[in-house]
Image (cartoon, rainbow, N blue to C red):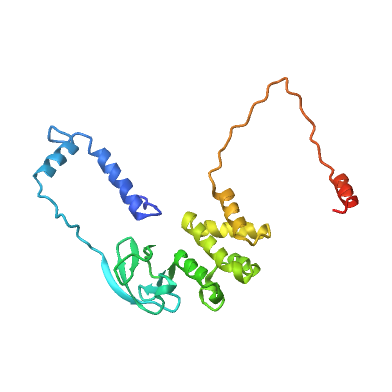
Amino acid sequence: MLVPVPRFERLAAFNKEQLSICDRDAERDHYRKNATIAELFKADQAALLDLPSVPLDVSTYITVRTNGYGRLYLQNGLHEYSVSPKFAKCKVLVKVTAMEVIPLDENHREIVRHERCYGDHRQQRMQWLPYLTQLSRSPGALKYSGIYAMLPESVQQFLERCNKGEKGKVLQAIATLTEKNGFESAVETVNDALAYDATDTDSLLNLHRRIHGNVVELTPIRLAGNIPDLKRINPNLTAYDDKLGKAGG
């Protein structure tokens, strides 16, 4: 009872860390035999039979019917996972592992991959890329789909400012940014674009490069003592305005 409960974000990473601790511990000498634990383990391995060449699949396969938004429910409806609008209201084969939930198409190919939910409370896993890609192909039906209401408010505001011809391009740009750096970073870019009152795809892409690009951090330059301090000059642009006004600009 006095041992603290281990805290971790991902079970797989925690298990890998514990395994590395065991590997380091195996370098010590065995308490009775004249060899290290690692050397004794290698001798045991040499006496073992070969493992089967075909790996054993311990996953669970279940068939689930999706709803009108292309989403499925597990754990008595408590855990919700997105699939794709292409697979709305149809039966989907789902591969469930200890760590992941993977919906498969009719050819048993992976559609999306989710981290598995655990617990007896409502949880949701959403992969936006299939939805954004599908909406970019038919932007005219955007408002009439239930997917539009699921989008963040800032993305809805950005799309409201776009004309009908630009919405498809904007959705495709958001899908590209999502595939590159994730949906959260794409939404962050949209928020900045709203602040700049920009509504075109070029602004989105340029803002994303500026926010999430690799910025080289330069160390401050130390000036020599003989460099004089310069006073800051605040430009006065009224003279330019007067000249432009006289020229009819």
* 94 horizontally vs 31: left or right: right
Residue 178, horizontal then vertical, whole percent:
49, 59
Q: Nearer the viewer, residue 97 or 239?
A: 239
Would residue 123 be found to the left or right of residue 171 on screen?
Answer: left
Residue shown at the point (10%, 47%) measured from the top left = 48
Residue at horizontal 22%, vertical 39%?
Answer: 26
Relative vertical location of residue 60 with respect to residue 220 in this rendering, above or below: below
Compare residues 118 and 135 and report the one nearer the observer.
135
Looking at the image, the residue that sits furthest to the top is: 226
Query: Above or below — where is 27 with respect to 74?
Result: above
Residue 66 position, x and y percent, is: 39, 77
Residue at the spot 36% in from the left edge and 73% down from the top edge = 74
Residue 213 in view in this figure: yes
Q: Where is residue 232 in the image (x, y as percent from the top left)?
A: 79, 35
Give the image location of residue 209, x and y in percent: 56, 50
Residue 248 as seen in the image, left or right of residue 195: right
